Structure formats: structure tokens, C-alpha cells
């Protein structure tokens, strides 16, 4: 069944996470029209964001747009590897002889990357950039031929989360690296971090009814203009636009979805996904095509969904059950797409696909 008033949110780039749809029910024709929501959308971090609020923002829509632009521009200057002058680019270009001071907001993202890396035993590795770039999914150009085993082995020598350090000194944070060519890439966490920061901005201005989508990362609170909880649809990972896999009511929880089915390229008759396994140095080849995670913050969910995508269907489900995570997986099978989810995710499902 197709629900009314579906707003499509593009997938993440450069990581191109799983496609999400925001769904809001319209009132019947016999009822008075609901007050208009304030909705702002734009581009950031190589992808799209959409912010919908159901409360007045001080100064109106123009003020909200200005504050969003300022917040997102600041984040890009901190963590964008596509900006050669950003803090993360300067860190990557540096020798590492002296730790680099970084602001608390950036330190929070780095710490989440380190923590998730240890929790997932390296399935998430924020130093995997050399491999991502080697396979053509970073700022570097796409390769004209498959990287050699020697190139992969050399790049793997520069990937090691244990060679990254974050030191807190009072109110300051110092970011260090044990080898000069360690390359930090926070793009897999950027969208979740942005969703959380926008949520903090809104709540700081007295806005307590909102839906935030930064590509595949979602934050929500309160209700839409009809007084209903916000609803989000996980769509079928296919070329059929708008095919709904399941409808989720996050109910204040953050939702992040990662997928392997939209950011890929074909070379010499083979398809290569942007999801790189740090252990092998190569794109994943398993049948898990989408992973969604519900956690209190979008930053945490954004870290875990990528790690689950690296694991593959069986290992991802085992990990989710071991850690009692609310996880929803979509697996490609000979009969089509199959959804699998943990008991913790079930209460958030409102409508199963017929």
C-alpha cells in the first residue's frame, strides 16, 4: 500500500547511505487544513538535508535557514576531506609529530569512531580512507583498472585505528597519529553528527516537534502537524522508486541506514560497492544490501550501520543480538529482498509491507 504525502530524501554521498522516505498523513477533506509545517532543505557534505519543524522558530524560517547554514558550514570546515583547508585535511596532510588541537564537536565524532571501532573489532575503521580512496570512493578519482594486490597491501599498512589517538586536556582535545600517513575519514559519521547537532540547535530554541533527515540519518521528536508521531519508511533497495519495505515510528529515537546498493561502479564486468572491509582491503561481496539501526543518537546509529554492512547478514544479526541492538537488515536472496530484524526493532514497526 502506498501512503499519502511521501517526501523522498536522497541517499548519502559520498557514502550514499540507505534511502529513507518521510511520511506524514494528510487530514481528511472534511477536516480543516492543518497549519503549515516549516520545511527547509538543502545540500551539505555532498548530500541533502531536510529539516521539518512543527513549532515556531525564533525569527522565522529565514533565521532557521541562516543558523542551519552556519552550523553545517562549520561542520564542513572541520570534517570534510573534500575541503583541503578543513581541519581533518590539515591533520591528514600533517606529519603527526605534534598532536593537533581540535574543537569539542569534532572530538566527539572522533571518539565515537574510536569507540565503535573497538566495539565492532575493527569492522568500522575511521582510518580506512587509503583503501576508500584506492577504490575510487573518496576525493581521489575512480580507478581505470582494479587495484593490484600489492596496492591493496600497501594501503592496508596505513589503516589502523590503534594508531589514532585523542587526548583530552582540560577543555581541550588533541588529535594525534602514530604514523605520518595515517588518514582520518569521518564521512561515515558526518551525517549522524549533523542530525544530532541540528536537533540540539532546535531544542535550544524551544523547538520540540521536529524531523531531521541528513541523507540516511534521522532525528525526530514530538509530533507532526496532525498530532501524530513522525513516521519514516525504509524503502526497498532496488531501482523501483518509492517501493516501501517497512514503515518505522522512531518515537524520539535516532535512525540511520547504510546501504551498498546505490553507491557503486562497474569495472571489467564486476560491480564494486563503496563498503570496504578493512580486514581484506576490498569492497564487500555478501548479500546484505541495507542495515538500519535505532539508537538514542544519530551519531551512534551512523557508526553502527556501517559496521553492520561490513559484517554481512549473518555476522551482523549475531552482533546485533549479542549487544541487544534495534537493527533491521535487508538481504538479497534468490527470491528477492528479505527483511530481518531484532526483537528490539519490532516495537517501532508500524506497517509491514503486504
Image (cartoon, rainbow, N blue to C red):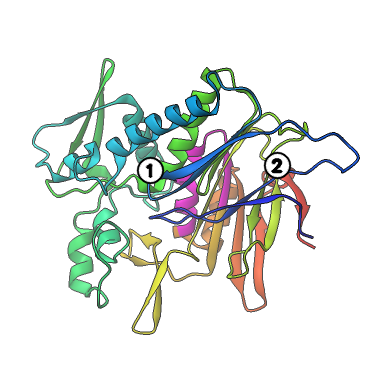
Determine the main secondary structure of the stretch shown in magenta.
helix
Please report whichever mark, 1 or 2, sits nearer to the chain's N-terminal start: 1
Where residue 268 sits: x, y (%)?
34, 84
Classify residue 226 as left or right of residue 291.
right
In-front residue for pair 183/166: 183
Q: What element carries label 1?
A: helix
What residue would you read off at disc 2? 249
Residue 339: % across, % down: 66, 61
Q: Which residue is drawn at 29% across and 54% down?
A: 128
The quadrant of the rendering that contains the N terminus is bottom right
The residue that appears at 51% across and 42% down in the rendered structure is 41
State the CA–CA distance, disc 1 to disc 2.
Answer: 30 Å
Q: Quadrant of residue 335?
A: bottom right
- Above or below 242: residue 171: above
Q: Give the range drawn in magenta.
A: 292-309
Mark seen at residue 118: 1
Check disc 2: other Cα within 10 Å, few if <14, some if 14-19, many if 20+: many
Q: Is residue 162 above or below residue 144?
A: above
Residue 235: mark: none
Q: Are marks 1 and 2 in contact (CB under 8 Å)?
A: no
Q: In the image, is residue 47 part of the stretch drawn in magenta? A: no
Residue 302 forms part of the magenta stretch: yes
The residue lying toward the viewer, choosing from 286 and 107, is 107
Q: Which residue is drawn at 53% across and 56% down?
A: 18
Dividing the picture into quadrants, the one containing residue 14 is: bottom left
Coordinates of residue 260 in the picture (x, y in percent): 48, 63
- Quarter of the rendering occupied by the C terminus: bottom right
Vertical position of residue 284 compared to residue 217: above or below = below
Q: For the view shown, which residue lies furthest in the right direction? A: 30
Q: Residues within 10 Å of mark 1 (few under 14, many from 20)?
A: some
| Residue mark closest to the camera, 1 vs 2 | 2
Amino acid at each position: 500500500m502506498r501512503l499519502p504525502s511521501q517526501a523522498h530524501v536522497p541517499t548519502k554521498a559520498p557514502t550514499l547511505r540507505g534511502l529513507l522516505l518521510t511520511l506524514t498523513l494528510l487530514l481528511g477533506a472534511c477536516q480543516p487544513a492543518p497549519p503549515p509545517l516549516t520545511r527547509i532543505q538543502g545540500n551539505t557534505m555532498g548530500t541533502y538535508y531536510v529539516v521539518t519543524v512543527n513549532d515556531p522558530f525564533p525569527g522565522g524560517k529565514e533565521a532557521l535557514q541562516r543558523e542551519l547554514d552556519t552550523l553545517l558550514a562549520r561542520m564542513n570546515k572541520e570534517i570534510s576531506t573534500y575541503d583541503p583547508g578543513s581541519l581533518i585535511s590539515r591533520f591528514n596532510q600533517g606529519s603527526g609529530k605534534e598532536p593537533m588541537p581540535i574543537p569539542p564537536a569534532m572530538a566527539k565524532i572522533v571518539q565515537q569512531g574510536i569507540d565503535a571501532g573497538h566495539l565492532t573489532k575493527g569492522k568500522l575503521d575511521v582510518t580506512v580512507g587509503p583503501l576508500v580512496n584506492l577504490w575510487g570512493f573518496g576525493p581521489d578519482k575512480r580507478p581505470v583498472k582494479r587495484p593490484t594486490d600489492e596496492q591493496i597491501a600497501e594501503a592496508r599498512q596505513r589503516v589502523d585505528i590503534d594508531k589514532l589517538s585523542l587526548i583530552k586536556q582540560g577543555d581541550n582535545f588533541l588529535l594525534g597519529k602514530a604514523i605520518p600517513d595515517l588518514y582520518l575519514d569521518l564521512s561515515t559519521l558526518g551525517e549522524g553528527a549533523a542530525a544530532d547537532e541540528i536537533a540540539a540547535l532546535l531544542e535550544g530554541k524551544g523547538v520540540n516537534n521536529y524531523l531531521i533527515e541528513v541523507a540516511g540519518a534521522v532525528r525526530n521528536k514530538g509530533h507532526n502537524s496532525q498530532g501524530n508521531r513522525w513516521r519514516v519508511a525504509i524503502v526497498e533497495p532496488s531501482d523501483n522508486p518509492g517501493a516501501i519495505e517497512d514503515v518505522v515510528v522512531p518515537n524520539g529515537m535516532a535512525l540511520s541506514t547504510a546501504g551498498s546498493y546505490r553507491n557503486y561502479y562497474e569495472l571489467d564486468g564486476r560491480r564494486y560497492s563503496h563498503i570496504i572491509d578493512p580486514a581484506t582491503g576490498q569492497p564487500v561481496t555478501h548479500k546484505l544490501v541495507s542495515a538500519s539501526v535505532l539508537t538514542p543518537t544519530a551519531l551512534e546509529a551512523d557508526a553502527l550501520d556501517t559496521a553492520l554492512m561490513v559484517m554481512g547478514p549473518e555476522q551482523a544479526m549475531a552482533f546485533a543480538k549479542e549487544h541487544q541492538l534495534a537493527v533491521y537488515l535487508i538481504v538479497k536472496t534468490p527470491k528477492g529482498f528479505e527483511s530481518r530484524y531484532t526483537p528490539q526493532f519490532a516495537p517501532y514497526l508500524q506497517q509491514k509491507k503486504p
